[in-house]
Amino acid sequence: MNAKIEKYPEETIIVREGESNTDMFKIVSGHAEVYVGFGSDQETLIKIIGPHSCFGELGMLLNKPSIYTVRAYSDVLALRIGREDMVDFVSGNQRNVIDIMRNMASTMMTMRSHIDLLIKEIESGNKPDPITLQKARKAMKGYGMYRSIQEASDILTSRR
């Protein structure tokens, strides 16, 4: 297996939004920031992650460009696992499967929370204020859901 421990100094970009990434990372020590729109006017910090957190699993599993930028908040020590090593890694480190699943479940719960807040505001009969709508759109873009949430918003507001 070619998985290896790598060190990323504070403020280092580990994964860049829109770029191809077929590796998954598991933080051993340190913390990292997860952004969408990093470096742009639309920059949004989604969360800060730490030890046992994983990222890059969507790109690795789906062979899609990264939907977010991950930057080392402090010095980060991370296990980097390539797509070709994933089967060996999982079978030899079953505890890590739980961490990967927790990470994906956390992402889904956060995404669901953002969707619920937006739908609640739309269903209240009020058109969502521009700031709330902008925040929801940026958050959903961070989960690869921008188009879906925009379509849902358009459908719900056009019914009024």
Image (spheres, rainbow, N blue to C red):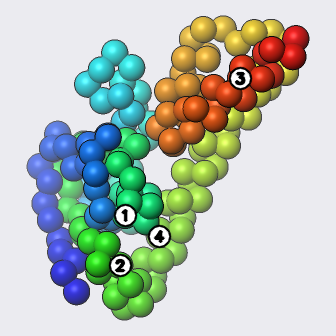
Of tags 3 and 4, which is closer to the observer? 3
Q: Are marks 4 and 2 in contact (CB under 8 Å)?
A: no
User: What type is the residue that disc 1 sits on?
Assistant: Met
Q: Nearer the viewer, residue 124 or 88?
A: 88
Q: CA distance from mark 3 to mark 4?
A: 33 Å
Q: CA distance from mark 2 to mark 3?
A: 38 Å
Give the crowd class for mark 2: few <14, some 14-19, many >=20 residues within 10 Å.
Answer: some
Which label is found at residue 153?
Answer: 3
The image shows residue 136, relative to residue 89, as above or below, that is above
Sequence-earlier tag: 4 or 1: 1
Q: Nearer the viewer, residue 133 or 106?
A: 133
Q: CA distance from mark 4 to mark 1?
A: 16 Å
Whole-percent x, y for residue 56 in the image: 36, 57
Q: Nearer the viewer, residue 91 or 53?
A: 91
User: What type is the residue that disc 4 sits on?
Assistant: Asp
Secondary structure found at label 4: helix
Which image quarter: residue 19? Answer: top left
User: What type is the residue that disc 2 sits on?
Assistant: Met
Sequence-earlier tag: 2 or 3: 2
Whole-percent x, y for residue 36 in the image: 39, 33
Whether residue 51 is visible: no
Which image quarter: residue 152? Answer: top right
Secondary structure found at label 3: helix
The residue indicated by pointer 2 is 86
Q: CA distance from mark 2 to mark 1?
A: 9 Å
Viewed as shown, does residue 131 lie left or right of 43? right
The residue indicated by pointer 1 is 60
Of tags 4 and 1, which is closer to the observer? 1
Whole-percent x, y for residue 62 in the image: 44, 61
Sequence-earlier tag: 3 or 4: 4
